[in-house]
Image: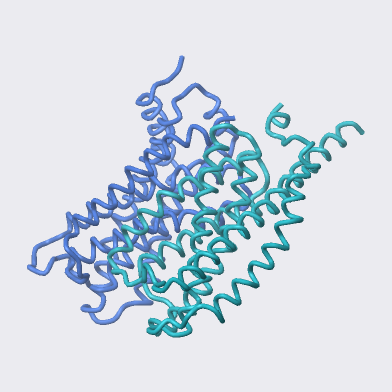
Chain colours: A cyan, B blue
Amino acid sequence: MIEDTAAPKTSGLRSSKARMFIKYIAPLAALAILACHYLIFVYAPMEPEMRAVQRIYYFHVPSAMMTYLGFILCSVGSLAYLLTRRSKYDVFAYACAEVGLVFGLVVMTTGPLWARGAWERWWTWEPRLISMSLLMLIFAGYWVLRTYGGRSEETKKFAAVLAVFGTPNIYFVNRAAARFGGHHPIKVETTDAMKMVFKTCMFTFLVVFFLLLVCRYRSHMNRAIVSVLRRRLSRIS
Amino acid sequence: MRLGFLQTFLVVLRNDVRAEARSRQTVVTMILFGIVLATVFAFGFTSEPKINRNTFPGILWGCLFFTSVLGVGRTFFRESEDGAFHALVLSPADRGGILMAKIVMNTLLASLVMAVILPLLVVLLSVELVDLNGKSIVGLVCLQLVSGIFSFTLVATPLAVMAVTARFAEVLLPMLIFPMVTPVLVAGVASTGIALGTSLGDSHWTWLKVIWGIGAVFGALGMVLFERMVTE
């Protein structure tokens, strides 16, 4: 039976490790985010050139990193699913794409806000901006497919292929977008205090990323388990 | 007996060409849609010939993309209609051969369509296909278009398998394909623009090479992944 090899173990519902992780890490992450706000808006020194607008950077860059991390992990999980057909990899990839998209939305919101202050326009055709927006579109497509395209085995396989296809595209988009020329800043922080704030934000975002990932993974896994149980129940009765 | 790559390729391609030659369903739809698109774009963008020359590459490649996606969406249309898709997948035929035949078929269809649209756009927008020195670039533009079409179908055709199974694939498929093939669009518009002398840039060959590179990478990836995608 396809169902028995593909179905997750029903004991997964009781996974207490993940529950403990969420229980203790979630409040800590909330506190860390508050601390980040203090560091960004009070502690971090004013950047002489861009003034206050530069503070967006502490949100923008870590979010961008988490978006890339989410999409890359999604591709890795998808590849693992295509090779092994274990449904846990498929669920992992789905959760990664979702969390990546959430951080991507943060990037796409904070980016134009910063650009308005620094470049005096909301959007410009620049390699980094184009590659990010296309990546968002690809994974938005992946998300729509996973969410509304039905839950058949074929859709899962197809979505996995899509995620694997999406990764080399990062390179080509960058290559193609080079024609527009780049003026996206690479490194902004100059003083030690700025570096410290940036590193703290980075670490906090990483923790939030994995927290969200575990939550989504568990929720999708439970959904899959419930549907398996329901099918078994209907077969008995 | 397991059919080899070349044999499968030839059998599937011959079958598709023959079926299409008899019904002409897909190609006629694509050409008509292309003509409508070209007219819509022409209405939207036409102004004096000098400005038309600037918008021409974008309109040309836009038409290519929208018409090609129609053909790609119908790649497995005949097979899925009478359940032959599963028979095809279950048969011992080489999967790579099936995919390659479909890719070539889609390339042929889209090339036929562009053979109609290119002259139509040239007439509608009154653009002369010559470079800055007055030398004809018709051959070069055709090469760019065929390369672009081939790369497009190499990226998009493996994705068309989805149309067989997923729900509301007609809407989903273009949405998934377009972000994937945007690099081809950018490179294509750049190469045609540089050839026409309207875009700045070093050489149109660089962009042609980008198109080929995209085709090569996604072609190889598609060949490897298609096997996994259709295995039951």
Q: Quadrant of residue B139?
A: bottom left
Q: Position of residue A227 (x, y in %)?
A: 78, 42
Q: Residue at x 45, y 47 (%)?
A: A165
User: Against B151, is B89 above or below?
Assistant: above
Q: How many marks?
A: 0
Front one among A208 and A143: A208
Single out the residue that lies furthest toward the right: A237
Task: Please give left or right for residue B131 compared with residue A226 in the image.
Answer: left
Q: Position of residue A226 (x, y in %)?
A: 80, 43
Image quarter in which the C terminus of chain B is found: top right
Does residue A71 appear left or right of residue A49 in this picture? Answer: right
Q: Nearer the viewer, residue B98 or A64?
A: A64
Residue A89: x percent and y percent? 61, 40
Compared to A183, does B67 lie above or below? above
User: Depth check: A218 or B28 in front?
Assistant: A218
In the displayed image of the protein, which residue is found farthest to the front? A192
Which of the 4 quarters of the picture holds residue B102? Answer: top left
Residue at 33% from the left image edge and 67% from the top image edge: B59
What residue lies at 65% left-to-right and 38% top-to-bottom?
A87
Residue B190, image x and y in percent? 26, 63
**Above or below A5: residue B190:** below
Question: Between residues A174 and B83, which one lies in front from this camera angle?
Answer: A174
Which residue corresponds to the image point at 20% horizontal and 70% vertical from the top-left? B200
